[in-house]
Image (cartoon, helix red, strand yellow):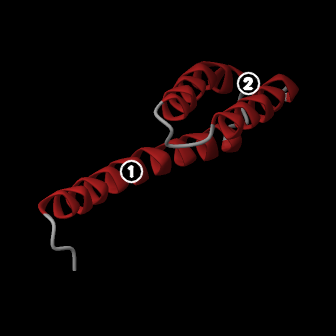
Amino acid sequence: MANHQSSIKRIRQTKVRRLHNRYYAKTARNAVRALRATENKDEAQALYPKVCSMLDKLAKKHVIHKNKAGNLKSKLSAYVNKLA
């Protein structure tokens, strides 16, 4: 166990941030799944900007990598455009 006050505080902060990041990353994954499960083009087009915004915010805060956000957005836009 850590003995220094700074390391004890760092452990506390890391735990809180990890839980925070996990929550938002999981929420984004569920949003991506919901968009991929959508068969209606109008619904998908309405949902797409919200999901992209969510991914951009996570990438900006380094919860997910910026390239991962870009790849997901690219694949989702291709999916939305392919819908009839």
What is the crowding at mark 2: few (fewer than 14 residues within 10 Å), some, or many (at least 20)? some
Label 2 sits on a secondary structure element that is helix
Please indicate whether residue 45 sits to the left or right of residue 75 in the image: left
In the image, what residue type sits under mark 1? Tyr
Q: Where is residue 53 in the image (x, y as percent from the top left)?
A: 54, 23
Q: How far apart are marks 2 and 1 (CA)?
A: 28 Å
Q: Nearer the viewer, residue 84 or 55?
A: 55
Please indicate whether residue 79 sits to the left or right of residue 62 in the image: right
Please indicate whether residue 68 sits to the left or right of residue 1 in the image: right
Q: Residue at x 28, y 60 (%)?
A: 15
In the image, what residue type sits under mark 2? Lys
Q: In which quarter of the image is residue 35?
A: top right
Q: Where is residue 72 in the image (x, y as percent from the top left)?
A: 71, 37
Please indicate whether residue 75 sits to the left or right of residue 38 in the image: right
Q: In which quarter of the image is residue 74?
A: top right
Q: Residue at x 62, y 47 (%)?
A: 33
Q: Quadrant of the C terminus?
A: top right
Q: Position of residue 49 (x, y in %)?
A: 59, 19
Q: In this view, does 37 lie above or below 51?
A: below
Query: Residue tagged by mark 2?
Result: 41
Q: Nearer the viewer, residue 28 or 63?
A: 63
What is the crowding at mark 1: few (fewer than 14 residues within 10 Å), some, or many (at least 20)? few
Q: In this view, does 49 lie above or below 65?
A: above
- Name the residue furthest front: 4
- Name the residue furthest bottom: 1
Q: Residue at x 32, y 50 (%)?
A: 17
- Ranked by sequence position, the earlier of labels 2 and 1 is 1
Query: Residue tagged by mark 1?
Result: 23
Q: Where is residue 22 in the image (x, y as percent from the top left)?
A: 42, 54
Q: In this view, does 7 lie above or below 32?
A: below
